[in-house]
Amino acid sequence: QSALTQPASVSGSPGQSITISCTGTNSDVGGYNFVSWYQQHPDKVPKLLIYAVSKRPPGVSDRFSGSKSGNTASLTISGLQTEDEADYFCNSYTSTTTLVVFGGGTRLTVL
Amino acid sequence: EVRLVESGGVVVQRGGSLRLSCAASGFTFVDFAMHWVRQTPGKGLEWVALISWDGGVTFYADSVKGRFTVSRDQDDNSLSLQMNSLRPEDAALYYCVKDIGSSWYTFDSWGQGTLVTVSS
């Protein structure tokens, strides 16, 4: 069982917007602005999409955005494209004995 | 371009030891913290270990604390993970990962991974 909770799957149609949630506690997501999001296509390595809750690294499309409210962080993908179909993972700093925790991942299907 | 190339993954018996290596290039290695992150189909991604830019600070996941040791060679631009007392649950694809630099909790470049299998 992962420390951060993500929905197992979400789906959307091309052009739509979807949001993936990542729920933790006051010891991680809610207490610090160190939430990141990663995209992983099948048989590929994870790619950083969002860090520090809402910052985008150079080269990442502005269709990807991040936010946080309380103990839940969210990744929003607007203008869905077929190439967005992938697994998405969140992670956060945690003040517990383990430094970093991940979510279990969300499979995005673009219908 | 950042390049991280892992090696050392093999089939090892339960209770055995293994050393993973990672060759880094394309960035100033001594300026960045480095991590090991592992992935299994059933458990997803799991952070394993961190070593600071100068090697002076290390952190470990609870699941590997006391069994794994992370180290780095600044002259060789390499990262290592010594894994002892291996358990079946340690079987995974192990990634060498570069930290973004502004924190110790964000991973901006990943290697292709090296596969560790633990036989019981």
Image (spheres, coloured by chain):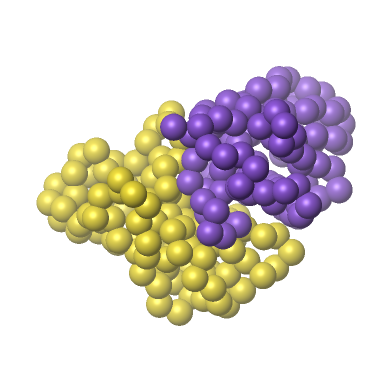
- Which of the image's four quarters has the N terminus of chain B? top left
Work out whether residue A66 or residue B79 is closer to the camera in this orientation and state it: B79
Q: Residue A96's image quarter?
A: bottom right
Colour purple belongs to chain: B
Asked whether residue B99 is in view, the answer is yes
Residue A91 to residue B53: above or below: below
Horizontally, is B120 left or right of A48 in the view? Answer: right
| Residue occupying image coordinates x 40% and y 72% | A68
Work out whether residue B53 or residue A61 is closer to the camera in this orientation and state it: B53
Colour yellow belongs to chain: A
Q: Position of residue B99 (x, y in %)?
A: 56, 49
Q: Position of residue B43 (x, y in %)?
A: 58, 45
Q: Residue B89's image quarter?
A: top right
- Which of the image's four quarters has the C terminus of chain B? top right
Residue B1 to residue A61: above or below: above
Count of number-bearing discs = 0
| Residue occupying image coordinates x 53% and y 59% | B102
Q: Position of residue A92 (x, y in %)?
A: 54, 62
| Residue occupying image coordinates x 45% and y 79% | A70
